[in-house]
Image (cartoon, grey):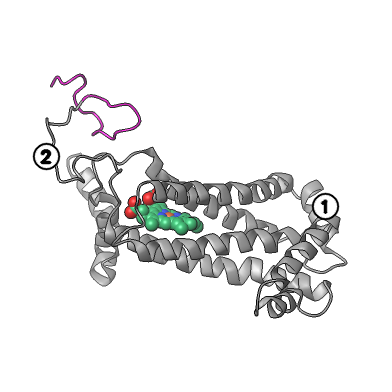
Amino acid sequence: MARQPNRMQQAVNFPLDWLEERSGLVGGVRYFLFRKVPGDTNWMQTLGSATLTAFLVQTITGVILAMYYQPTPKDAYSSIQNITDHVTMGWLVRGMHRWGASVFIILMFLHMGRVFLFGAYKYPRELNWIVGVLLLVMGMMEGFTGYLLPWDQTAYWATVVGINLNGTAPFLGPWLAQFLRSGQEIGGETLTRFYSLHMLLIPGAIIGLITLHLYLVIRLGVTSPPWSKEAAGQERAEEPSTARAGLTRPVARGGAVGGQD
Ligand code: HEM
């Protein structure tokens, strides 16, 4: 009986050791999970992860939709109807993708607001702010290109307005409008181009930028809130209480309650 857990441990450790020896990945993940963050990190600092979760939901539901959607003027609208009315749980996946797009954009703005209010864009995190701005632009481009795909009246005319707006930009405007339309008129080629941008180019760019963004978050560490006494270089007046601080301050699980042992 006593040897059982040992064998179990070996069975778990063997592949992990194998991987670690050849890649260092396990150590990397351990560093990521157990790295230190400021003691007064709070719920507002989860907005970045919430944005990431929304993006993952968009990716998963988008891949499922792409299995049924047909990007041609003749079939686009009917394939969307088919997804909504006939594909098993299609209405749910489509609904999650459609509403999730707004959730993703709103969360991005809330996260950006938190970063701004905490002054977390200042040295040495300016580069991460710039990466964030690119993510914001890419996120909105995702929304714009996705809106045309149902190929109904709303989609068509919203895209006409969007492309005309882009066309009024100085110098690059006309070229940009031509590029988005893929010609002089909005038609089948515009739809194919928007689909390619929406499901290949822009998500690829977003994934690359998120990787860089998270690398910088881990490298530079998370900013303390502006009211943090520790961040201002002051000593803690008292040892932090081990009492459960509610949901806003993390405490070790299973720790003493009410300051007792
Ligand atoms: C796809 C969109 C985005 C994702 C998935 C994302 C994800 C994250 C995550 C997980 C963090 C660490 C935890 C946190 O502070 O919340 C973070 C931090 C940060 N993000 Fe974003 N972010 C996105 C967009 C943006 C935007 C639009 C900006 C600003 C223009 C931005 C600027 C920053 C900065 C400066 C930090 C460092 C904050 C600190 O050290 O306290 N991010 N991001």
* Three-letter amino acid code of the residue under disc 2: Glu
Nearest to the observer: residue 73 or residue 109: 109
Q: Is residue 251 magenta?
A: yes
Main secondary-structure element of the magenta-colored stretch: loop
Q: Quadrant of ligand 1?
A: bottom left
Q: Residue furthest front?
A: 170
Q: Is mark 2 within 8 Å of ligand 1?
A: no
Nearest to the observer: residue 24 or residue 200: 200
Q: Quadrant of the N terminus?
A: top left
Nearest to the observer: residue 157 or residue 215: 157
Q: What's the CA distance linking mark 2 and mark 1?
A: 62 Å
Please state which of the two labelled residues, at mark 2 or mark 1, is closer to the viewer.
2
Above or below for 186 versus 54: below
Left or right: 57, with 41 as reference point: right
Q: Which residues are magenta?
A: 243-261
Residue 240 in the image: state x and y as whole percent.
17, 31
Above or below for 102 versus 59: above
Left or right: 228, with 157 as reference point: left
Which mark identifies residue 213?
none
Answer few, some or many: residues within 10 Å of disc 1's Cα (few below 14, many 20 plus, some between 14 and 19).
Answer: some
Residue 173 in the image: state x and y as whole percent.
68, 75
Q: Quadrant of the C terminus?
A: top left
Residue 109 in the image: state x and y as whole percent.
52, 50
Answer few, some or many: residues within 10 Å of disc 2's Cα (few below 14, many 20 plus, some between 14 and 19).
Answer: few
Which residue is disc 2 drawn over? 235
Can residue 112 be seen here? The reply is yes
Which residue is disc 1 drawn over? 81
Can residue 69 be seen here? The reply is no
Residue 17 in the image: state x and y as whole percent.
24, 62
SS class, disc 1: helix
